[in-house]
Image (spheres, rainbow, N blue to C red):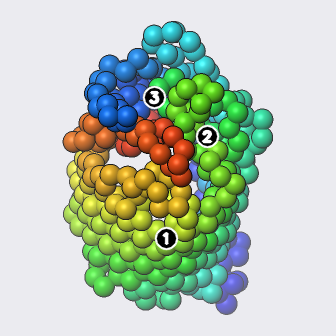
Amino acid sequence: ANAAAAWPPTASTALDVTFVHNASQGRSRETFDTRVIGFGLSASRPSDPSDQRAHSNGVIGRAHWTTARNLLMAGAEVHDAEVTDNLTMRQNSGHTTGVFVQNRYLAVDGQLSISAGFRYDKASTYDEASSSPKVGVVWKPTGGRWLVRGNVSRAFNAPTFSQLFSTGFVRGNPGLVAQTLLLGEVGAEVRPSAFLNLGVSVFRLSLDNPIFPRFNAAINATQFTNVSVASDNAGGMVTADYRRAGWLAGASYTYLDPGQATFHTWRHTGKVFAAWTAGRVSLGAELRGQTEGYWADGFARPADDYAVINARISYAPLARLTLTATAENLGNARYATSANIGNVAGVSNNTGIPRPGRFFAVGLRAAL
């Protein structure tokens, strides 16, 4: 009887188009206030000669088709970007195109959610295309205050614009190859009240050809490099979220067992955040910290623990127009970049780590 009542299904469709413009000018993330330590020298270089300006424009279109049991979404996006070195006036530009599709199906009277998605991207700055599939399931019993979930995904990430062309303290490297991430995760959530949600999950991930800064003697500078063939990691996460009357607050803790592939990896990551929305205005802030990090594989070269504050604000003067502003790393300017020259396994090495850096951005989002 239920099947007969659901056929033909009641369907609805929707189409939205978003135009995105991002621009930044001045010192890049890597060069806000660079401190160089090594060979007995310590110097602050707040005017490191690597000022850059960048801008990008993009269009994202999505189509939705919804029935009582099914949600199908498909879309495409195009982005163009340009980076200019303010000192040499050298320019690099490129564009990316992508298509994506995702489907979610509700089975067993809506208690079982099955989703699958696929994304295909092509960048003008990299020959190989990116294909990223994902499959996930969620089980939530009718009337229950808990659920269990699992997902498997593959993400193929071509080198970013900065990794290819940066003229900052960490130089770009046009010879980079793409990173491939394989992720498997299982988790559970419980809602003890209408306002509180608690979650726990465990995951395992494998990263092929990870990209990190390493010293390149051929150019006598630190450069983005594919540092190893593969790294396998496992860990877990606990989360807590509270929503009520326009407020969202929460916290999370992530533990990562890096194995021996500890380069630029932190064992402990914690976050605390809060956001408030009233009418057309939204404000948010996040405190994020990491501890037990290393600047080399095999637990060599301990990295400094850090904590940073990020903030954002958005305002919608019109129903389909939103203005945004973000600030990353409000209180730790000198952590933007560190370089430590010393010995790793008896070999002189210069390792530059772009840690979070101070960064400001403004933008707008328009939907048709």
> In this rendering, would 349 be left or right of 205?
left
Q: Earlier in the sequence, mark 1 or mark 3?
A: 3
Residue 34: image location, x then y, percent: 34, 30
Dots 2, 1 in contact, CB < 8 A: no
- Vertical arrangement, residue 9 with respect to residue 361, above or below: below
**Cα distance, mark 1 to mark 3?**
29 Å
Q: Nearer the viewer, residue 237 or 268?
A: 268
Task: Identify the disc placed on residue 257.
Answer: 1
The residue wearing badge 2 is 225
Amino acid marked by disc 1: Asp
Task: Identify the disc placed on residue 169.
Answer: 3
Q: Secondary structure at mark 3?
A: loop
> In this rendering, would 274 be left or right of 189?
left
Dots 1, 3 in contact, CB < 8 A: no
Residue 119: image location, x then y, percent: 69, 51
**Looking at the image, which residue is at 59% across and 33% down?**
216
